[in-house]
Image (cartoon, rainbow, N blue to C red):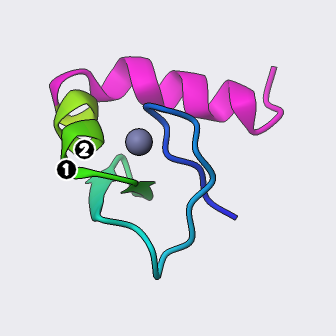
Amino acid sequence: MPKDPVCKMEISKENAAAESQYKGSTYYFCSAECKESFDKQPDRYAERAKKAAGMK
Ligand SMILES: [Zn+2]
């Protein structure tokens, strides 16, 4: 299940309030606020999302 990279909430594609494309990956968000935060600092959040997925 994808995770909201901003607040770490697990979220299904069906329930995502927003999504964003970054470097070929799609990120899903629980709210428009989380998407806004991500869009401001995509590098920071994408990097953390990778680590959370087990790429240490
Ligand atoms: Zn969120």
* Residue type, mark 2 in image: Lys
Looking at the rendered structure, which numbered label has been put on residue 32? 1
Q: Is residue 3 above or below residue 40?
A: below
Give the Cα distance between marks 1 and 2.
Answer: 5 Å
User: SS for tag 1?
Assistant: helix
Check residue 43 for magenta coloring: yes
Q: Residue at x 53, y 24 (%)?
A: 47
Q: Amino acid at mark 1?
A: Ala
Q: Residues within 10 Å of mark 2 (few under 14, many from 20)?
A: many
Would residue 32 be found to the left or right of residue 26 on screen?
left
Which corner quadrant of the image does residue 42 belong to? top left
Quarter of the picture holding the N terminus = bottom right
Give the residue displayed 57% in from the left and 22% down from the top.
48
Q: Element at badge 2?
A: helix
Question: Label 1 CB, ligand 1: below 8 Å?
Answer: no
Percent of width and height locating residue 16: 39, 67
Residue 53, by quadrant, is top right
Residue that badge 2 annotates: 35
How many residues crowd mark 1 within 10 Å: few (<14), some (14–19), many (20+)?
A: few
Compared to residue 35, the image places residue 51 above or below, namely above
Asked if disc 2 is less than 8 Å from ligand 1, the answer is: no
Q: Please, what is the dominant secondary structure of the magenta stretch?
A: helix
Where are the magenta residues, as a range?
40-56
Q: Is residue 47 within the magenta segment?
A: yes
Direction from residue 14 to residue 54 in the image, left or right? right
- Quadrant where the C terminus lies? top right
Q: How many marks?
A: 2
Closer to the eye: label 1 or 2: 1
Q: Position of residue 18 (x, y in %)?
A: 26, 62
